[in-house]
Image (tube, coloured by chain):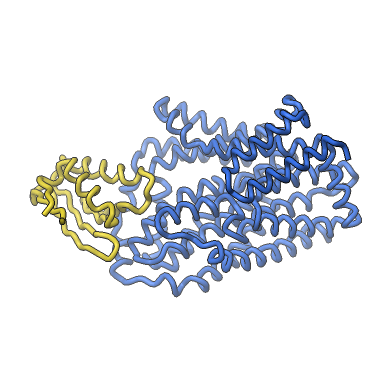
Amino acid sequence: MRLTYQFNEAVIQIIETPNETDVEFDIRILAENKWAGMKEIQKKFEENSVLTDVLFYEYENHHYRVIARQDYYVDFVLELLKHRLLEKVEWN
Amino acid sequence: MEQQAIWAIGIFLVIYALIISEKIHRTIVAMIGGLLMVALGIVNQETALHHIDFNTLGLLIGMMIIVSITADTGLFKFIAIWAAKKSKGNPVRILIALSLITAIGSAFLDNVTTVLLMVPVTFSITRQLRVPPLPFLITQIIASNVGGTATLIGDPPNIMIGSAVKELTFMAFINNLAPIAAIILVIFIPLFVLLFRKQIQTKPEYTQSIMDMDEKQLIADHKLLRKCLTVLGLTIIGFFLHQSLHLESATVALAGAFVLLLLTGEHMMEEAFTKVEWATIFFFVGLFVLVSGLIETGVIAELAAQAIELTNGDIVATSMLILWLSAIASAFLDNIPFVATMIPLIQEMGNMGVSNLEPLWWSLALGACLGGNGTLIGASANLIVAGMSSKEGHPIKFVQFMKYGFPLMLLSIVLASVYVFLRYLI
């Protein structure tokens, strides 16, 4: 089973690239009211006890590169949904 | 030998063996050892309390509070990414930059706290560059022990020595230990490059991703940062001036911590207190009481007399014995209990007529701090990095670390021997 998701392209742009041990996300937050949500997700993963679960790299204009370990992929996607950065998530 | 002394030695040896075996947490073992000394009447409670060095404990607690609040501002991440960008994203230059930041941070914060701050950002940078983290972590361990050697607050052995010997002020540590720590670091940096450069090759696109990062975004709270930097700066100035101000270093650190809590408000207090490493604090308490049993029963005095007999009271021989013994012992044992035992021993040598104790104190500090680089279990900073790295799926093997750490430790002790000899003994 694979987790798939949908998002509003006027709110967020996501490009996902799987690697051997992790999945890399190129994320641009376009809607101003979602900037804080992304910051909260970043804070959550940076403050937990696992250092390499989901790593955030921040660039200008609310552009992020996120590297999520395979075993934390679902956690990260669900956090995006929780903060309404995604519209729909389902198992296929 | 009196019955009490035999009991004290027995308890000490059993507790020491248990600490080394790591079967039970060292704090529990040390506290039980200390409590046994009191419960069996080897020292009474009042004497035991008198032996607990509250200056060491206060200094550690104060700095832990200041650093834990400052870490929340994102300052340390900012510095690391800023340095990585200044290094043009080149992994070898980043390895050098992070080693230098670790060494300087260790000197002015303490090496355990510094590595706790550096490890997460190291994982972040190395993942982005797609290079193995271990060369960075190993060099940071070594740099933290060298940097920590330079100041009174840099490494637990120095905190304990500075606290026990009032004449050895913050400035005295800098004047006497910072030059040799700097020399060792300058020699180690090219060796790090030589040892690890082939393991940390990356691709231009990964380098570029570091260069594109916006480090300013990492500062989470600018207002808090200003408060933290002001208090941290004043605290460090306070350390430089503590003798002129007639204040103990613990008073300076605790004043900094509580002024910062006053400025940040009550809401930070609970969280800051939870970040104090109470296990380390109680480990010290247990050790002080444990060693008090040896002091009060005359065991330390007997050992000091035998050491003087062994070296015929010759200060050169005694200094070199302490330096090398401390280095080898600290490589294989925890350097904190070792120094806790050596401090009263050197003080006793003073009581027995050895007039110039200064070279002995610096030899102990250099041996205990630099000796920690010998093996993975040599210092608290090593164990913390190894533990964090292993948890993230990158274990640092004992032999793997020793392959790099032990020869570098021997080199540093040779350099320290030459330094001590030239500076204090001719």
- Name the residue at 56% across, 65% down: B399
What is the quadrant of residue B145 in the picture? bottom right
* Image mark count: 0
Left or right, A33 with reference to B257: left
Using residue B32 as the reference point, say whether residue A73 is left or right of it.
left
Task: Give the residue drawn at x 35%, y 43%.
Answer: A47
Q: Position of residue B120 (x, y in %)?
A: 41, 52
Q: Colour of chain A?
A: yellow
Quadrant for the C terminus of chain B, please: bottom right
Which picture quadrant has residue B50? top right
Colour displayed for chain B in the image of the structure = blue
Residue B249 in view here: no
Residue at 80% across, 45% down:
B345
Q: Position of residue B83 (x, y in %)?
A: 42, 58
Towards the viewer: B376 or B242: B376
- The location of residue B343, given as percent across then percent down, is 75, 44
Residue under the point 25% across and 56% down: A65
